[in-house]
Image (cartoon, rainbow, N blue to C red):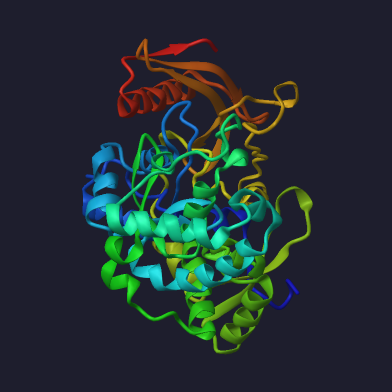
Amino acid sequence: MSDYLPVITTASARRLFMGAQGLLCDPGLKSTPATLQKMIKRMGFVQLDSINVVERAHHLTLASRFDDYRHEHFTRLLEKDRSLFEHWTHDASAIPTEWFPHWKPRFRRERERIQLHPWWQRRIGDAPDNVIAHVRERITSEGPLRSQDFEHDRKGEASAWWGWKPQKAALEFLWWAGELMVARRVHFQKLYDLTERVLPSHHQMPEPSEEEHVEWACVTALERLAVATPKELADFWKAISPAQAMTWCEAAAAKNRVARVVVESPNGVSPKPAYALADWEQRLKRLPAAPERMRLLCPFDPVLRDRARVLHLFDFDYRFEAFVPEPKRQYGYYVLPILEGEELVGRINPKFHRARGVLEIKRIFWEPDVRVTKARRRKLEDAATRLAEMIGAERVEWLA
C-alpha cells in the first residue's frame, strides 16, 4: 500500500497533531476569555477530573497553552457565558456549546442503556419512576441542587460513587439523558439544574439526523487529529462506531475530501494506513516551529488521551498510574509528562502542599535517550516555576 499512497513520517504526523491541538502556538500570547474559548474549540474539549494533587485537570491543560491563563476565565465561559457545557466525551469534559445538538443522540442512547443496566437498577431501588419524578420536581421548584441536598436513604453505607443513593442515581440518569445540566460546581461537586434553564436556546434545537451526526463527528475529529485511522476518529468523541467512521472515511476519500495515506511507524513497526486532511501537505508547510521551552502536560491533555497514539507518534509509553496498586507503579500516582519542543522527553512526579505553599518535585524520570544537560535542567526548572505561579505555590522544592 505504501507504494501507492503518500507516506507521512512520524515527525510530520506528530507536528500536524500538535498544531491542531494548539501546542505549536506561542504560549506567551495573551489569554482572554475569547482566546481561551477559541483554543478549547481548537482542541475539541477539555477533560475535567476530580484528582487535585497539583491542580484540576482543565486548569493544567489550559495553562500549558497560555502562560497567563486565569482560572476565572474558564469559569466565566462555563458558568456565566455558557459558551461551554459539561458533559461526556470519553470522560467528563467541557465542550463548546455550539455542538450541544450532537449530544442529543447520546442522551437518547444513554437513557435506554442506563435504565437496563443492573448496576443502576440496584442503586435506584424498586421504584425508579417515583425517585426520578421526586428529583425532577424538587429541581423544577427549588432550582439547582447537589446530591447532598437530597436525603440519604442508605444510611451507614459508603458515600463514594459505588455507594450511590437513589437520588444520586436519579440525578446522574437525568444528566446522562439530557434533562439536567451541570449548572456549576461547588468544591467540584455538581450542581444540577434543568437543561431548559441552563441552555434555553440550545435545548430547543432539533436532534441531528444520523447522517448529519456522523458527518459532524468525523469532520470535527479529523480537524483535531489531522491524521487518523477510522477507530481514532470514532474514539475522539465516543459518539459513533468505528464502522460508521470507516464508511464515512471511504466515502470522503472517494470525493477527495480526505486523503488516503500511510503513516510511518517508529522502531521499524510496519506503517499503518490512515486518513488525513486533504490539505495536510499545505498545513504542514505553514506550521510554526514548536516553542523550544519545556512544558508540563496534564495527564488528561487531549494529546495524551489515546495512549496507543502517543506511543506511535511520540515513541512515549505513558500510563496513568493513579488507579494502579502502589507496589506496581513505575513512576507514581500522578505524573506529568515533560514536553520539550516537539518531543516528550520525560516525566515528573509532583505534589502541591497547599498548607505550606510548596510545589514539591519528588522525582524526575528522563527518557533513556535524553541527555540531561545544564540547559535542559534549567528549562525544566523554568517550567516548574511557571506551574508554581499558576497554582499559587510560593516556591518549588526539588527532592530529585
Q: Is residue 279 above or below residue 361?
A: below
Q: Position of residue 204 (x, y in %)?
A: 32, 76
The residue closer to the viewer here, 394 or 76, is: 76
Left or right position of 255 against 200: right
Left or right position of 140 against 273: left
Can residue 20 be seen here? The reply is no
Left or right position of 145 against 176: left
Q: Residue at x 38, y 53 (%)?
A: 288
Q: Is residue 25 above or below residue 321?
A: below
Q: Quadrant of the C terminus?
A: top right
Can residue 181 be seen here? The reply is yes
Q: Position of residue 130 (x, y in %)?
A: 51, 59
Q: Is residue 9 above or below residue 2?
A: above
Q: Residue at x 38, y 57 (%)?
A: 181
Q: Residue at x 62, y 48 (%)?
A: 123
Q: For residue 81, which quarter of the picture?
A: bottom left
Q: For residue 232, which quarter of the picture?
A: bottom right
Left or right position of 127 against 60: right
Q: Residue at x 60, y 86 (%)?
A: 251
